[in-house]
Image (cartoon, helix red, strand yellow):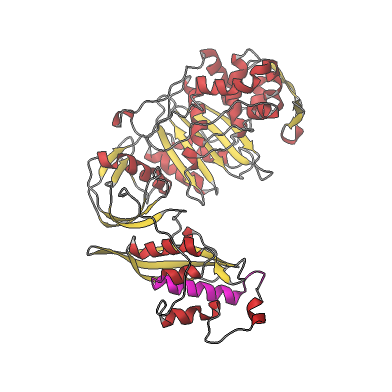
Amino acid sequence: MRSGAKVAVIGGAFVLVAGGLGYGAYSMLGDILGVDGGTRSASESSKVKTGPPSAEEIAETSKGFFDAWSAGDAPAAALLTNNESGAEPVLASYGEDARIGKVKITPGPAVGTKVPYTVKATVAYEGKSKPLSYASELTVVRGLTTGKALVDWDPTVVHPQLTEGATLRTGEASTPAIEAVDHSGTVLTKEKYPSLGPILDNLREKYGASAGGSPGIETWIEPADEAQPDVSLLTLAKGRPGQVRTTLDAGAQAAAERAVKKFDESSVVAVKPSTGAIRAIANNRSDGFNAAMTGQLAPGSTMKIVTAAMIIQHGLGSMGAKVECPPTVSWKGVTFHNLDDFSIADATLREAFAQSCNSTFIKPVKPLGDRAGSALGQEARDYFGLGQDNWQTGVASFDGSIPESSGAETAASYIGQGKVLMSPLNMASVTATVKNGAFKQPYLVARELDNRPFATARPLPAGVAEQLRQMMRYTATSPTGTGTKSMAGVGGDKGAKTGSAEVDGQTSNSWFTGFSNDLAAAAVVQSGGHGGDAAGPVVAEVLRAGG
């Protein structure tokens, strides 16, 4: 869909000149601009309103904006926003580049300063036309300098999927559409699997030209960042799609879609440990971001899987060895707490792992001395394939980040906080590595499709891998395991690890990762609380579906 060179449109200040506006637009703007046919005194013009806009102002401003927008008068509509130069080119492109006309906007009742509305329009291009409809909302605010009620400008005012710097366009697509299928040939569509929308767009951008199809006529959003895929909104004339086979499993994907619907701001990924094939990707987020693959969040105690591997390999403990689990532990003058300051008497590393004792995973690492700040990252890179920025999954993804640390940040990193960043894909891969005994780079399309290299890592020592599996199994099945409740309905050989990560004093992000037979999954629910509260049920539902 991208046509190469972009056309830059620079919006200047709107100047009201004779003949510049028709009488209808002039009348519509009269009260707002103060050009009602008379003159104002100096005292009247110096009065600037303050405070939230009134219901009358909200109704008047939104109506004026809708009327100008639907009439195709971009300058007049932009003048009613608090960012005229930013709004005008976007509003102008609505008709000029996207060929959207016959616009009818129907507002709903205002909710405070927000006005929801529906748009019904027609897209027409070279004799072909099709209806376009969608819903969005705007907010009316008080102008900072003028005191006038104005539309708070954001590209989503024009379309809910429009981002800053992006452009709406209609024409012949530069890449043919694709028909994506799962590993057994089942067709995967955005309509049936909504979470796959960004993934399918990404696959089309990358493989559409080589998949054997032909382009059609479409309306799409062209992002400002050329590395991001175009977002198709409407097809006026179909081309011939080329087929792209993925590693997804329709059953696991359907389960993932159902699972994330239960929690706002949730994401999940499932991976086949023996091969690295990605079986499911799902998100339920208000921003449409593919956090499952590209999110960068502190993983909390799910990171203790890697920390435990580091502890065992450095001879600092073993699954059955006695460890300390006091309520708190200090590192470089900072005190770290267990949840509710719990403690475990006569604990083993397995029990501390199952109950997610923070102090256990900080205290034993002190003997590493100068290596303490780099040991976790080294373990993650060498054995789990993380943090090297070289995963080639077939679509955009994040490889995890475990930078070298110092001071108290080192202790925080051992329990999955500090500077450590992961996505659900990364944590699903960590669990898959434990289950398989060796890292297999996750992938969504076969490497043979474009001969891309896969990331590699050293196999975990057999004894280490087996201890980690036993610790995860215990966490998913023992009476004290934090994952037992979530995994109760999951069958087969199963294991788990819970996590929660505090962010800026808000409710903790809920993390959970687990395996069942040859399927591993990980989920995050932002502000979801403890790992078993929200992310656990999401992972369990996906694991029950198999794949």
Query: Is any part of residue 484 visible from this angle?
Result: no
Q: Position of residue 224 (x, y in %)?
A: 42, 49
Q: Is residue 128 above or below residue 312?
A: below
Q: Position of residue 79 (x, y in %)?
A: 49, 70
Magenta-drawn stretch contains 71:
yes
Question: Would you identify the image quadrant in which residue 394 lies?
Answer: top left
Q: Viewer-proximal residue, 471 or 242?
A: 242
Q: Viewer-proximal residue, 378 or 497?
A: 378
Magenta-drawn stretch contains 331:
no
Task: Determine whether, in the image, residue 317 is placed left or right of residue 169.
Answer: right
Range of magenta residues: 50-73
Magenta stretch prevailing secondary structure: helix
Q: Viewer-proximal residue, 354 or 198?
A: 198
Task: Determine whether, in the image, residue 305 is placed left or right of residue 408.
Answer: left
Q: Position of residue 142 (x, y in %)?
A: 61, 68
Q: Is residue 140 above or below residue 364?
A: below
Residue displayed at 77% across by 28% down:
333
Q: Is residue 209 above or below residue 57?
A: above
- Indicate the quadrant containing the C terminus: top left, top right, bottom left or bottom right: top left
Q: Position of residue 143 (x, y in %)?
A: 60, 67
